Image (spheres, helix red, strand yellow):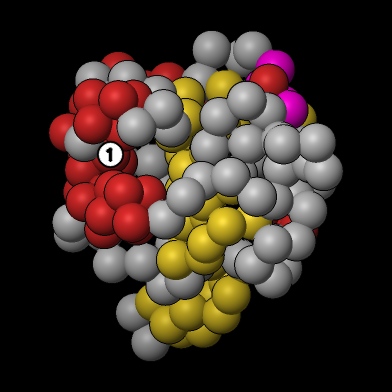
């Protein structure tokens, strides 16, 4: 995907097993952050960063959604354990992860495996021409990422 491309709707289950569509949030900008696995160190740092910045993100009128290939049950445990105030979307079949080409080769303990590349997308509200991709943060470093997103949101208009 390229900046300003229309973002297709998606449907995934959240941590409570409820259906969530991107179009549910058509009136607000969306921060969609992809992380490899719930309850791992980097993912916990990133998710807690968004938790700690959540009030500021809400004040900016932004919806925060985390996505990983975990099940709804694993997402619920992660959310509960770290008191995460936003929805975590389960993509165990990696439909959305593959749509955005985020399954990449990684080296783990000397072996080449495929894993989710930590990436954040900023999606615009629908102003009549659909929700559009405003920004991509590729290969995210979990430390201070939420603050990096906030800085971008304050510096950039969030309409298409």
In the rendered view, does 39 fall on the left or right side of 134?
left
Compared with 56, 32 (above or below) is below
Q: Name the residue: 47% across, 50% down.
A: 157
In-front residue for pair 37/132: 132
Image quadrant containing the N terminus = bottom right
Q: Name the residue: 73% across, 28% down.
A: 23
Residue 33, given in percent of the width and then of the height, sits at: 47, 48
Tell me how many marks there are. Answer: 1
Compared with 36, 27 (above or below) is above
Q: Using the rendered image of the protein, determine whether residue 40 is visible from the camera's viewpoint.
A: no
Q: Name the residue: 38% across, 87% down.
A: 110
In-front residue for pair 72/113: 72
In the rendered view, does 103 fall on the left or right side of 60?
right
Compared with 70, 88 (above or below) is above
Compared with 132, 11 (above or below) is above
Q: Name the residue: 30% across, 25% down.
A: 59
Residue 102, given in percent of the width and then of the height, sits at: 61, 66
Q: Secondary structure at mark 1?
A: helix
Residue 3, given in percent of the width and then of the height, sits at: 64, 67
Q: Residue 156 occupies which quadrant of the picture?
A: bottom left
Queried whether the magenta region covers residue 33, the answer comes back as: no
Q: Residue 71 occupies which quadrant of the picture?
A: top right
Q: Using the rendered image of the protein, determine whether residue 5 is visible from the camera's viewpoint.
A: yes
In-front residue for pair 81/159: 159
Residue 131, given in percent of the width and then of the height, sits at: 72, 43
Residue identified by numbered label 1: 50
Magenta part of the chain = 19-23
Q: Residue 127 occupies which quadrant of the picture?
A: top right
Q: Label 1 crowding class (10 Å Cα cut-off): few <14, some 14-19, many 20+?
A: many
């Amino acid at each position: 995907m390229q900046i300003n491309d229309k973002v297709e709707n998606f449907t995934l289950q959240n941590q409570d097993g409820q259906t969530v569509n991107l179009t549910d949030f058509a009136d607000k900008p969306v921060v969609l952050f992809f992380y490899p696995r719930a309850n791992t160190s980097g993912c916990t740092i990133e998710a807690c960063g968004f938790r700690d910045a959540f009030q500021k993100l809400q004040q900016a009128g932004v919806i925060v959604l985390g996505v990983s290939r975990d099940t709804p049950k694993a997402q619920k445990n992660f959310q509960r354990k770290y008191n995460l105030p936003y929805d975590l979307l389960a993509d165990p079949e990696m439909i959305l992860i593959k749509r955005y080409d985020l399954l990449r080769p990684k080296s783990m303990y000397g072996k080449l495996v495929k894993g989710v590349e930590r990436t954040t997308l900023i999606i615009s509200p629908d102003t009549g021409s659909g929700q559009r991709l405003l920004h991509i943060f590729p290969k995210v470093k979990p430390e201070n990422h939420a603050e990096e997103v906030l800085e971008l949101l304050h510096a950039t208009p969030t309409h298409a």
